[in-house]
């Protein structure tokens, strides 16, 4: 039995399930068309994305890193084909240029220092990065429409950065060469490579 703790990934709401399914499809499509030999998922949470990518990555070297030890334990159950370690995105215990694909999905909106995290992502990446954030203000508007987080005007707890697609792409362009931009409702997903 697989264990999940992030409610959005296991929502019974058909609209939420459709949106998550489209997000997964974009991530799968990108990972499936880019050549790389190893991958690290920074902020891997409970390993849900890694599990979803199992067909594309289980034959490659794969690692998940998260700050929360409980998430790492759940990741090992959900996606046992990867290796895991507890780690801080600002100071990763990884060699320079050690991963050809670095994914960091739905993390940067939670970070006090996203530019510092991007510096570390750049340090460990040898080729590609795949990044995503909730697309604002759409994300907050949709939260309010469904009656969530009304007192904080739709802001999801823990979100301290709010990126429109343009602002997010501009942030990524400072450090990487943006290859493709996707906007599955309500996210911005960017595939980029090292400059």
Image (cartoon, rainbow, N blue to C red):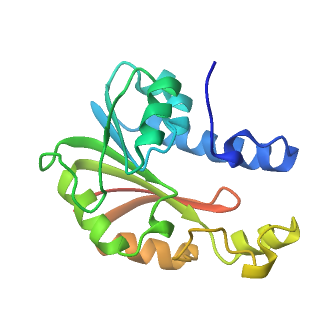
Q: In which quadrant of the rendered image does the N terminus lie?
A: top right
Residue 186 image point, x, y percent: 69, 62
Q: Residue at x 42, y 69 (%)?
A: 111
Residue 147 image point, x, y percent: 87, 68
- Quarter location, residue 89: bottom left
Q: Residue furthest front?
A: 70
- Quarter location, residue 17: top right
Q: Tell me: residue 117, above or below residue 36.
A: below
Q: Residue furthest left?
A: 96
Q: In which quadrant of the rendered image does the C terminus lie?
A: bottom left
Residue 84 image point, x, y percent: 33, 34
**Residue 17 placement, left or right of 159:** right
In this view of the protein, can residue 176 be seen by the observer? no
In this view of the protein, can residue 94 be seen by the observer? yes
Residue 130 image point, x, y percent: 41, 52
Relative depth, front residue between 107 and 183 = 107
Q: Residue at x 17, y 42 (%)?
A: 98
Q: Residue at x 40, y 75 (%)?
A: 112
Count of numbered labels shown in the rendering: 0
Relative depth, front residue between 66 and 178 = 66
Q: Residue at x 68, y 74 (%)?
A: 155
**Residue 65 placement, left or right of 47:** left
């Amino acid at each position: 039995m697989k264990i999940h703790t992030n409610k959005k990934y296991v929502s019974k709401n058909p609209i939420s399930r459709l949106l998550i399914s489209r997000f997964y499809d974009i991530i799968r499509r990108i990972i499936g068309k880019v050549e790389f030999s190893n991958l690290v998922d920074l902020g891997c949470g409970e390993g849900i994305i890694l599990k979803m990518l199992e067909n594309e990555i289980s034959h490659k070297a794969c690692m998940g890193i998260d700050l929360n030890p409980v998430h790492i334990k759940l990741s090992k159950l959900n996606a046992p084909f990867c290796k895991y370690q507890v780690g801080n995105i600002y100071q990763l215990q990884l060699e320079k240029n050690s991963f050809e694909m670095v994914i960091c999905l739905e993390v940067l909106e939670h970070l006090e220092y996203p530019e510092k995290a991007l510096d570390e992502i750049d340090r460990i990446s040898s080729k590609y990065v795949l990044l995503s954030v909730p697309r604002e203000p759409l994300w907050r508007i949709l939260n309010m429409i469904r009656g969530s987080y009304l007192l904080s005007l739709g802001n999801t707890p823990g979100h301290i950065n709010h990126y429109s697609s343009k602002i997010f792409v501009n942030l990524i362009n400072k450090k990487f060469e943006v290859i493709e931009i996707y906007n599955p409702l309500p996210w911005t997903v960017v595939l980029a490579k090292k400059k």
